[in-house]
């Protein structure tokens, strides 16, 4: 990291940093003991199971060194909230490990913590504990999110059955196109479209209102982080099934549509790009009405994009006339 605001202050020692900057993030969690004890105390609700997920991000690898600290904070928390949502879980708390690089300033850390606090309030969870250290390498951050789901209701990867419908929330490809823009490999878009796509890359929108409503409806679910086709492959592998996806049903934002109208090869980012953080799930055809109701109640768009086929059929993408589209033709790089 090379934050421009280095002048905003030298970092204080670990204890002062925790007390001044991070303890306020634990204020709403009595079991966090204001981050002054060695561990936190937590009791899951009656009849609930605890769902845990963790992610680590490294400057220069998972985020760009000049990304604003607010975006880094939101991405770190939200990728974990996306995993909880895809499992049907309601977020409760999180643990945070920060390894500050020598050049990370106090100003950068304050902005990072401020954005975490805003997002905590938005998604209804609190900081429960963690650790803060320094590193001689790049800034490294790890967050463990803890959520709850009714016992036995967590949405698995491996529950898809032949004939189930395949659905995805929101829109696909925005984040991958946003990353291309940030890398300077995609140009000529209108400034509003460019801003929209970049924001979708930097600040995912976890589908926290939708996920828990899919418990008892979806047969399998995960969040799209590796790209639609790769992640659908994960559901198919875990379920021992194949899937058939209709290209013309894949949901696109207006910004992505305009980008693809100018250059149709960009469609490969819709099917194969990563970082969408949308929920990809399967549900029996008889559940179509319940899926629609869950989408309406959660105010998240859900689109049916295909169906689950038999074992050994793999994941196929078909065009409007039902012909299989060779994945190579998409310029899809992961296969
Ligand atoms: Mg995931």
Image: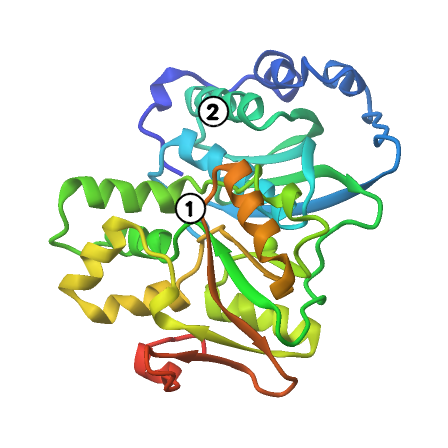
Foreground residue among 85 and 75: 85
- State the image coordinates of residue 95 (x, y, percent, origin top left): 69, 33
Above or below 52: residue 225? below
- State the image coordinates of residue 319 (x, y, percent, origin top left): 34, 79
Residue at figure coordinates x 55%, y 68% from the top left: 232
Where does label 2 land, which residue? 115
Q: In the picture provided, is 50 more to the left or to the right than 201?
A: right
- State the image coordinates of residue 92 (x, y, percent, origin top left): 70, 30
Circles 2, 1 touching at the beta carbon (< 8 Å): no
Residue at figure coordinates x 45%, y 54% from the top left: 275
**Label disc, if present, on residue 63 of the rendered structure:** 1
Ligand 1 quadrant in view: bottom right
Foreground residue among 312 and 189: 312
Mark 2, other Cα within 10 Å: few <14 / some 14–19 / many ≥20: some
**Label disc, if present, on residue 23 of the rendered structure:** none
Residue at figure coordinates x 43%, y 59% from the top left: 274
SS for dot 1: loop
Q: Nearer the viewer, mark 2 or mark 1?
A: 2
**Image quadrant in which you'd find residue 284:** bottom right
């Amino acid at each position: 990291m090379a934050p421009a605001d280095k002048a905003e202050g030298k970092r204080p020692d670990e204890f002062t940093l925790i007390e001044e900057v991070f303890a306020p993030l634990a204020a709403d969690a009595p079991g966090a003991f204001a981050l002054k004890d060695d561990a936190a105390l937590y009791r899951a609700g009656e009849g609930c199971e605890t769902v845990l997920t963790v992610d680590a991000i490294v400057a220069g690898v998972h985020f760009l060194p000049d990304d604003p600290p607010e975006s880094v904070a939101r991405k770190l928390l939200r990728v974990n909230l996306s995993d909880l949502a895809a499992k049907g879980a309601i977020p409760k708390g999180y643990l945070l490990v920060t390894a500050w690089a020598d050049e990370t300033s106090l100003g950068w850390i304050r902005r990072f913590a401020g954005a975490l606090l805003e997002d905590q309030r938005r998604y209804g969870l609190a900081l429960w504990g963690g650790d803060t250290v320094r590193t001689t390498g790049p800034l490294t951050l790890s967050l463990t999110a803890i959520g709850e789901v009714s016992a036995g209701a967590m949405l698995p990867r491996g529950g898809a059955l032949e004939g189930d419908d395949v659905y995805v929330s929101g829109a696909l490809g925005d984040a991958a196109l946003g990353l291309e823009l940030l890398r300077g490999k995609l140009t000529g878009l209108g400034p509003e479209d460019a801003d929209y796509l970049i924001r979708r890359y930097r600040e995912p929108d976890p589908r926290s209102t939708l996920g828990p409503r899919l418990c008892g409806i979806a047969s399998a679910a995960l969040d799209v982080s590796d790209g639609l086709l790769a992640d659908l492959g994960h559901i198919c592998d875990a379920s021992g099934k194949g899937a058939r996806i209709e290209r013309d049903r894949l949901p696109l934002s207006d910004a992505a549509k305009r980008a693809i109208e100018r250059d149709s090869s960009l469609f490969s980012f819709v099917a194969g790009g990563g970082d969408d953080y949308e929920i990809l799930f399967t549900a029996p055809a008889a559940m179509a009405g319940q899926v629609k109701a869950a989408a309406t109640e959660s105010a998240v768009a859900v689109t049916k994009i295909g169906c689950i086929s038999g074992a050994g059929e793999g994941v196929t993408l078909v065009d409007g006339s039902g012909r299989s589209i060779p994945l190579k033709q998409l310029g899809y790089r992961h296969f």
